[in-house]
Amino acid sequence: MSEFQIHTFPNGLQLVHQHINHDTVVSHVGLIINTGSRDETPKEIGLAHFIEHVLFKGTKKRKAYHVLSRLEDVGAELNAYTGKEETVITTSFLNEHYERSIELMADIVINSTFPQKEIEKEKEVVIDEINSYRDTPSEQIFDDFDWLLFPNHPLGYNILGTKAHVRKFAQKHVFQFVQKHYQAHNITISSVGNINFTKLMFLVEKYFGDMATGESNKTRLAPEAYEAVDQQKNRRVYQAHCMIGNRAYSLIDEKRVAFSLLNNYLGGPGMNSRLNLGIREKYGFTYNLESNYTALSDTGHFSIYLGTDQQYLQKTIELVHKELKQLRDVKIGPQQLKKAQLQLIGQIAISEESNANRMINNGKSLMSYGKISDLKTVNAKIMTVTPEMILEVANEIFEPKQLSMLVYQ
């Protein structure tokens, strides 16, 4: 795998490419658009996600069928997802189809016509998606918890929106949002594949070169001061669901690395996490138990999720707080820290083995930091974390008075 090659075009569009060896026949290209649900106004709740759906419903030169078939006819894949701060469109294809992929993505983001007939049909699809989430308490509780951490703020919005908002969307709303946010300065193209960088730049210039630059100063409403909240909702559930958490560090906060390490040690995917060993393995109380940390451009959020039988709920919550108190009061030992560091380094390396993941991560990194750090640099940062740093972030984020809790019973 080569070093990263980066270029900024005259219209502000950014391109990052990482060349893969000649033995790999599949390449990946993605558009990371610096726009998500937090960029919506109160009348636009759910619109960023809705646009992700209707982007594929026709362009000035293609009907919906031809958009979908353009890559699938050659066995390639076209996908998209919407987050709080980004919309991502990805393609995976055989190396010889680079131009086909780039041309289609340009056609979608520049020339989509958003027919009203297709908008009306897609409303029902999105409403079904909303209903599906509402039928899945283990997923809906994450969205409801966001509202506790960021009340009356776009970061607290459900990415899918509400049925009422979706039903009101019209073609003019879609065009207004796209014209405002889908501009060259707001887009990073990321490529991981077997293509010469000069040729790749030529293809991107060919199909994206005429894209409007747009305004370069993106402003986002900062969250107001936060106060912890305890809330219980009565739901028709067989299993109790609980979220405990707090706001956390942003993407540019120097404490982010230490807290990422602590979160992974506490309740990451490893079966040897503190929460898993101290609750699931020791008592058998829970099937689902995890902690999550997401860093955003100007803030972040941390949460612990658990699902357990009603009769074990209170005891499980007490055990969670016991683990958090231990991490606030007792400095992690050198051996424990070294194991936690090596575990996180290994997990990141395995994730980076996926070229599709690498493509998205490269694009997000360039968009957020203006640069990309290789694995060696990332690993070095992880290894600089000290027990004192872990103790400091534990006391800041796990402060009991700052922890909110949401329970479905």
Image: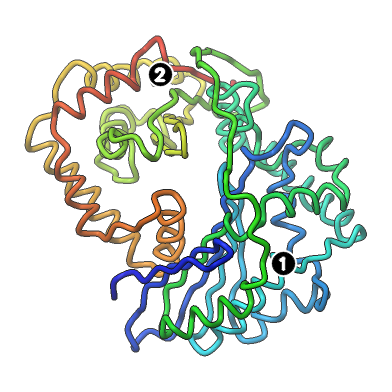
Residue 195 in the figure: left or right of residue 265: right
**Observer-nearest residue: 299 or 209?**
209
Residue at horizontal 74%, vertical 45%? Answer: 47
Q: In which quarter of the image is the N terminus?
A: bottom left
Q: Mark 1 points at which residue?
A: 110
In the image, residue 16 sits, relative to residue 70, either above or below, namely above
Quadrant of the image occupied by residue 314:
top left
**Residue 64: percent from left, percent from top:** 80, 72
* Image spot of residue 289 (x, y percent): 40, 34
- Nearest the camera: 29 or 111? 111
Relative to 1, say whether 165 is above or below.
above
Callout 2 amino acid: Ile
Q: Residues within 10 Å of mark 1 (few under 14, many from 20)?
A: many
Residue at 29% of width from left, 21% of height from top? 324
Rendered view: 388 above or below 374: above
Circle 2 sits on which residue?
A: 317
Q: Which residue ends up furthest to the top in the rendered image? A: 401
- In space, the residues marked 1 and 2 are separated at their CA atoms by 50 Å
- Whichever of labels 1 and 2 marks the residue nearer the N terminus, that label is 1
**104 relative to 194 in the view: left or right:** right
Quarter of the picture containing the C terminus is top right
